[in-house]
Image (cartoon, rainbow, N blue to C red):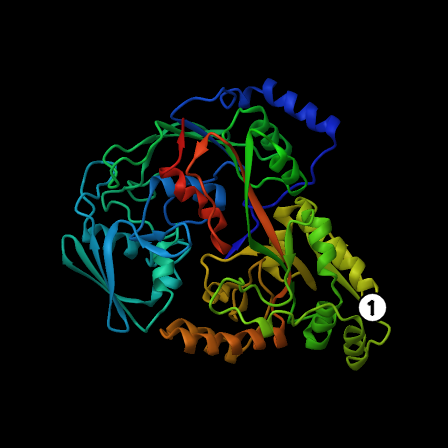
Amino acid sequence: MRNELDRSAMRRPLGRRHFLAGAAGLALAPNWRTAARARTPGVLTFGLSAYPPSVKPFEFVGAASASVRMQLYRGLLSFDAQGEVRPEVAEEWRRDGDRAYVFKLRANAKFHNGDPVTAADVKSSFEQIVGERSTAFLRTEFAVIERIDEVDARTVKLTLKRPSATFPYLLATVNAPIISAKTPANAQIAIGCGPYTMGEVERGTRMELVPFRDYYKPGRPRLQRLRFVAYPDDNLRLAAVEAGDVDVIEYVPWPAMDQIERSQRLRLDTRDGPFMHLIFNFRQGPFTDARLRQAAAFAVDREAIVRAAFSGRGAVLESIPIPRESPYFIEGNSRFWRRDLARSRALLAEAGHPNGFTASLLSTATYGMHKDTAEVVQQSLREVGIQAELRLPEWGTRIQLGNRGQYEFAVMGSAGDFNDPDALTAWLAPNPVAAYGRSFGYESARMTELLEAGRAELDVARRRAVYDEMEKLAQRDAPMVGLAWRSQGFAAQRYVENFQTMPGFLFSYAALSLEDASVG
């Protein structure tokens, strides 16, 4: 599950006076001097929204870290520009029956220490992910692996405990890289086989990467040097790309998207994919009653959220988040929570609250999009008599309260790990372990059965039927209530070539294209 820890939260942009002062401060601040530069052929400077806290291969600590990790490490599979699974370190792969996959490794794939990538390295990497003391992001998902066989030095066979239509998606994510078995235990940087190796690092500020000349794709990477520079402040990040100090920035503030589009020197590349939603406490408080969850869901003005929180850059989300482009998107299910104040009031009366009730709404003051969304929810619910008392702690406290289940309902922002309904397992599957991004205490044996059935079904038509029922059950139980799709944007200098975003949930995988990017 990918939430908004350090990957997609936008602070409210400052006024012009503060903006210019911030831009001037950028030029003067010692920590940022290394970023300022004119256009340099062969060198690309990428403005991150946060400094990566770690680049360990198997841990997910936000999109900024993932962007760097995609350069250092690669897995058996990856995603192409359309978001489809493609071969990566494996030059070819095939299904072997219903429960096994066979991968043939590239003959020219090498690690950064010069060793060839072998089946033994694949086995070692995956055994680390599922290890007893592993903190790997995919440890639970990889428990489906029953056996790993080294057929020969370049061939590996993975046998699963049960069929899984989505296992190749997991292998394609940034969280399943292949690292050398010679990597020391607890190494901060593993021995990978990606297009770049780590160069000079200024902790807290920047990372410089240099091309790995034995990379298995001839002619890649095209750059001579790749610089990642952290600009946690939205206004400074925007000022840096407008001044030409950086070539690309992630997470363009929504109010600034119009000005980027009008620029003669910059181009804006946006996609809808991340989403905002409500979660609830199923164990205590008013929302243990499904009728009150539904009353809140039908009362929200989603169009106002898109306008207020995202400057109109997005779309309403009136069901659970299944992208329209997905073969599992069902038009008839997609408008379930269309605003209906009369229905909301009827549900309140049926639940014994004809005059409404009071509940605390958890969000955060740290990130503007969370705060703005919560304020619109508050205003919307007031129209039917639900008095939402906002709690807006800083982000760290927001996480702690969510993990402890110390809230009644909350605003959350998220994105899936791949473009398939199975990615919603993180929010819909009943789980005894509390997590700040999903509803606290949700239990449903039938939901578990449907998620497992959808994952195990290999036929698209039958999977569609499973996910149709799953979506309707999610609408009934409301463990997550969709609010809005939001656009996310990159801004790039027009002279940057071959850098492109990815569709749907894979927005942050744009960094995969940095192996093809060039600066003339």
Q: Nearer the viewer, residue 149 or 19?
A: 19
Q: Residue at image x 64%, y 21%?
A: 25
Q: Is residue 61 visible?
A: no
Q: Residue at image x 35%, y 64%?
A: 167
Q: Nearer the viewer, residue 513 or 480?
A: 513
Q: Residue at image x 86%, y 73%?
A: 355
Measured as percent of width and height from the top left, residue 367 is found at 66, 45
Figure label count: 1
Above or below 99: residue 135: above
Location of the C terminus by quadrant is top left
Measured as percent of width and height from the top left, residue 492 is found at 51, 34
Q: Nearer the viewer, residue 287 or 489?
A: 489
Measured as percent of width and height from the top left, residue 195 is found at 31, 38
Measured as percent of width and height from the top left, residue 478 is found at 63, 71
Q: Which residue is mark 1?
A: 384
Q: Looking at this rendering, what residue extends furthest in the left direction?
A: 152
| Secondary structure beneath label 1 | loop
Residue 96 lies in quadrant? bottom left
Q: Is residue 240 visible?
A: yes
Q: Looking at this rendering, what residue extends furthest in the right direction?
A: 355
Q: Nearer the viewer, residue 105 or 87?
A: 87
